[in-house]
Amino acid sequence: MHQLIVSPYNGTFLIARPGSKGGMRIPRTLYEELASIAESSSPPPAWLLGHARTAWNVDLAGAVMRDAVLVRSGTGLGYGRATYEINKGCNFNCEHCYLAERKFEGLPWPEKVRLLRLLRDAGVLWLQFTGGEPLIDRDFVDAYTLAHRSGMLIEILTNGSRLHRPEIIGLLHDLPPHKVTVSLYGATPDSFDSLTRRPGAFKLVEKGLVAAREAGIALELALIITRHNAHELDAMRALAERYGASRQEYGTISLTYTGTPEPPAAQAPGFLDETGVFEGCPAGHTFFHVDPHGLATMCKVGRENPVALMSEGLNGLLRLPGIADAQTLRTGGCDGCRLSGTCRVCRPLAKAYQEAKAPLNTYCQHGSEEAS
């Protein structure tokens, strides 16, 4: 299995190691040097041996290029990142969930293979598996393995309920992800299980966190703050420290796919995400999202005019930047807003809330102040 990945990325060239943070940027000349010997039995060049020891404490002495270093070819599309929503099913039933229905949907395995190869050929280096719940997908292990061996750095977005299973922990130990992000819905069984509406959910997630920590898997906890657990926020932060995980905190709850406003009712007053002023986004240009049926959109929220990758192929992605630009214009309820210069909400998200007639204070940091 490859120890290092060498890849073009957004006009530059990077060297990264699966399962490890940090990387190095190299000039085109060094990338071309590595590409010219990528499939050979030649040893890695001396400069790469030194960098591997310094950056990751990896000794490649005695290794050959074709086994130790995966060199990815370039693409004219320029997409370095993508998210793959492998299914829409979930074994939790969270009150705030944006999935209006939790019916399992997804491509059959041969089509998943073709989709993952399209993502590779689009230039995707960072790939996030999400859902639904990706770990309940019958093809997850095979899909993860294919993506990893294709030279992608992988993040898994999961509820953590199946993280403890031997086939999952063994997979992640042998083929390390960039990180596993586990959603945390409370610090006690009472709050956690009542929100997920799954008895025993908290114990399952803790079991998974323990297993991941013992296997040395990079963890991040996504602290989902709702009215059920806001009083436990400090304890949730302490859980992240206990398991050696980094953390992100989220208080803004997304709408359902069908555009109904019920999920924001779970928000805890005073915990809207305090993100920075929205000044644009690379979605649709260097990043895209793929749903369970292979439909590519600018992101998880901006799903207008999807590109049918399975029928259009990579050429369909050429249309995506224009589709994305059209969705980011301040129109409708935001058109002419005197406060838009300090708005923290992207246009596709604001549009979804407006179409659902959600109360202003559930998504707009300007609260009840009218923008006109």
Image (cartoon, helix red, strand yellow):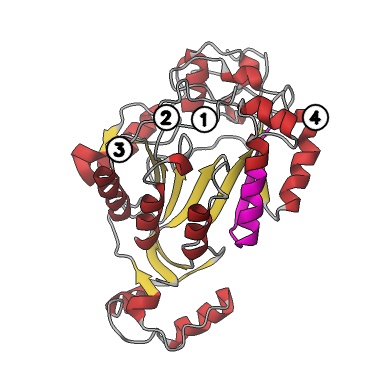
| Image vertical order of residue 323 relative to residue 95, above or below | below
Task: Measuring from the top left, give residue 266's x and y in whole percent.
Answer: 65, 21
Q: Which kind of residue does numbered mark 2 sit on?
A: Gly
- In the rendered image, residue 80 lying in the magenta stretch gets the answer no
Magenta-drawn segment: 205-224
Q: Where residue 259 is drawn, which disc sits there?
A: none
Residue wearing tag 2: 302
* Residue 31 visible to an observer of this rendering: yes
Residue wearing tag 1: 346
Residue wearing tag 4: 231
The CA distance from mark 3 to mark 4 is 40 Å
Q: Which kind of residue does numbered mark 1 sit on?
A: Cys
Q: Earlier in the sequence, mark 1 or mark 4?
A: 4
Considering depth in this image, is 159 or 262 the residue closer to the camera?
A: 159
Q: Where residue 107 is drawn, which disc sits there?
A: 3
Q: Earlier in the sequence, mark 3 or mark 4?
A: 3
* Residue 177 visible to an observer of this rendering: no
Q: Which kind of residue does numbered mark 4 sit on?
A: His
Q: Nearer the viewer, mark 1 or mark 4?
A: 4
Secondary structure state at the residue bearing disc 3: loop
